[in-house]
């Protein structure tokens, strides 16, 4: 919901899983569908808020070991 903090975010892991916002009143809004899943290495999403436009953005997040932790890279582009 616009301007309000979600009560929680739910992630259903794995390819075909979803990322969903759950509002305090129980309203659920799907944010993304997981299109690629390689735990610890890569996560790909089709990010599309339920805004009625039908557009989505492909988001790819990669995780690479680094000397002091993990390097996280995010790439996004409209599909």
Image (cartoon, grey):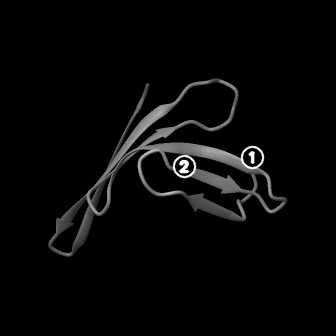
Residue 4: x and y in percent read: 76, 56
Decide if residue 5 is on the left or right side of residue 14: right
**Can you tell which of label 1 and label 2 is closer to the viewer?**
2
Relative to 15, does residue 46 appear above or below in the rendering? above
- Mark 1, Cα crowd under 10 Å, few <14 / some 14-19 / many 20+, is few
Residue at left 80%, top 58%? 26
Rendering coords of residue 72 (x, y %): 30, 58
SS state under label 1: loop
Question: How many numbered marks have been drawn onto this rendered protein structure?
Answer: 2
Give the position of the C terminus as an image quadrant.
top left
Left or right placement of residue 58 versus residue 38 in this view: right
Disc 1 to disc 2, how far (Cα)?
A: 20 Å
* Foreground of the two, 52 or 73: 52
Q: Nearer the viewer, residue 2 or 60?
A: 60
Given residues 40 and 4, the one toward you in this image is 40
**Residue under the point 76% across and 58% down:** 23
Q: Is residue 41 above or below residue 32?
A: below
Q: Quadrant of residue 65?
A: bottom left
> Residue 62: image x %, image y %?
28, 53
* Label 2, residues with CA under 10 Å away: few <14, some 14-19, many ≥20: many
**Residue receiving disc 1:** 2
Q: Residue furthest right?
A: 25
Q: Secondary structure at mark 2?
A: strand
Q: Which mark is residue 10?
A: none
Residue lying at the far bottom in this picture: please name it.
68
* Residue at 46%, 57% in the rendered image: 13
Question: x%, y% of residue 36?
Answer: 36, 45
Q: Which residue is mark 2?
A: 18
């Amino acid at each position: 919901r616009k301007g309000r903090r979600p009560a929680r975010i739910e992630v259903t892991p794995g390819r075909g899983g979803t990322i969903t916002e759950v509002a305090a009143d129980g309203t659920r809004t799907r944010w993304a569908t997981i299109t690629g899943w390689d735990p610890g290495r890569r996560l790909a999403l089709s990010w599309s808020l339920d805004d009625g436009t039908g557009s989505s953005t492909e988001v790819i997040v990669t995780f690479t070991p680094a000397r002091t932790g993990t390097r996280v890279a995010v790439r996004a582009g409209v599909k």
